[in-house]
Amino acid sequence: MKNLKWYTLPWVAVLSLTMLSCDDDDNKPAGAFEKGVFVVNEGNFGIANGTMSFIDPNDGTVTQDLFGTVNNGLALGDVVQSMSVDGDRAFVVVNNSNKIEVVNANTFVAEYTLEDLALPRYFTTLNGKGYVTEWVSFSDPGRVTIIDLDLHSVTGSITTDFGAENILAHDDKLYVSNNFSTTVSVIDPATEEVIKTIQVGSSPGSFVVDNQDMIWVICGGGYDLDYNPLNDGKLVRLDPAESDNEATNSVTGEIELGMNVASKAAINQTKDSIFYFSGKSVYAFGTSASAASSTPLVTEASATSFYGIGLDPESGVLYLGDSKGFVGNGTVYRYTTSGTVVDKVTSGIGPSGFVFK
């Protein structure tokens, strides 16, 4: 019994210290970039100078070229298209480098690279798998490629329509906007098949989900043979309850915008106002309204042309990226959702998207 006590007491002490250590670790920040706003900067096509910026919400400071800063000057690649966060990992899609860089979402330390993709665009996860849209080429139909997140490898792909762009995981289905066409593809991940193709409008892009669980897709609009805008941009509302049956109509509303717009949108905290832009003007649409307003929420005189949009779900601040014509660094403007300017900061080249964490 004495020996038993002799060994038990030290182990109890060690266990106690271990538990205290775990408690201390739980209270420590997971990394310098655990909380803040990531800015996706495309960079100049063909030059491989795309970057990620990070805006610290505590003091407003900006870390430029986040990937290179953390990873000993390593270049991120050619046309940084988007970033998606799943748990402690972030997936940075690099379009013209045909890859995804996977990093720790809190420290931005590089973990591994998914290569041999074909013009990838956007990434999401669902039920433990990764899904990335790919244009493939400008003459072939696009696709969604399936990633085994444990093995870090491709396990299959699903052909959609031309220009597979944004992807939304919702109610165990995947929705893909096909930007070179007029359609949205609905995929059942269980069968890895397109189960429905929905006609929406020219150049569909971003998805948002409103407070009635309706999916909205913004369609940028088309052009005539002389590349004049047809001014047929629209917001299209889809009912996810009608996604299983090809014979039923998923479209429950269409809002004509009266102009061509960027195929990007954001929704507010209460999920009842959608924000979109054209040129240097930003517009707001209430999801219960029957028509869009032709009056901008704000027009930024000092902007060259907006290129990206996002809305912080915690602070409610609206973020707009100005590419400045891809000549030097861009600018990120911040506004309230009522249109009041908050401030502006410098980003990398071609700020096109935002991730809030």
Image (cartoon, grey):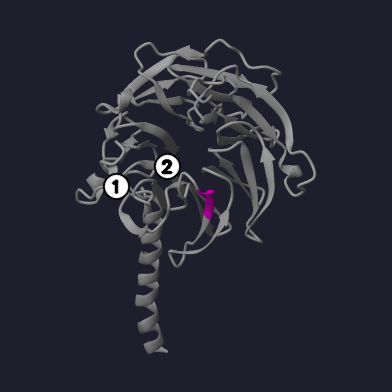
Q: Nearer the viewer, residue 65 or 8?
A: 65
Q: Position of residue 344 (x, y in %)?
A: 34, 21
Query: Residue at label 2?
Result: 82
Along the viewing direction, whichever of 141 and 188 lies nearer the viewer: 141
Residue at point 32%, 24% (across, down): 325
Q: Label 1's element?
A: loop
Please identify the dominant SS of the magenta region.
loop
Residue 282 numbered tag: none
Residue most toward the right? 247
Q: Badge 1 is on which residue?
A: 76
Q: Of callouts 2 and 1, which one flags the residue occurring earlier in the amino acid sequence?
A: 1
Question: Is 104 rendered above or below residue 51?
Answer: below
Tell me what residue is drawn at x 24 percent, y 28 percent.
328
Image position, residue 194 (x, y; %): 65, 53
Which residue corresponds to the image point at 24% horizontal and 51% vertical from the top-left?
A: 71
Relative placement, left or right, of 116 versus 239 is: left
Q: Amino acid at mark 1?
A: Leu
Residue 57 in view in this figure:
no
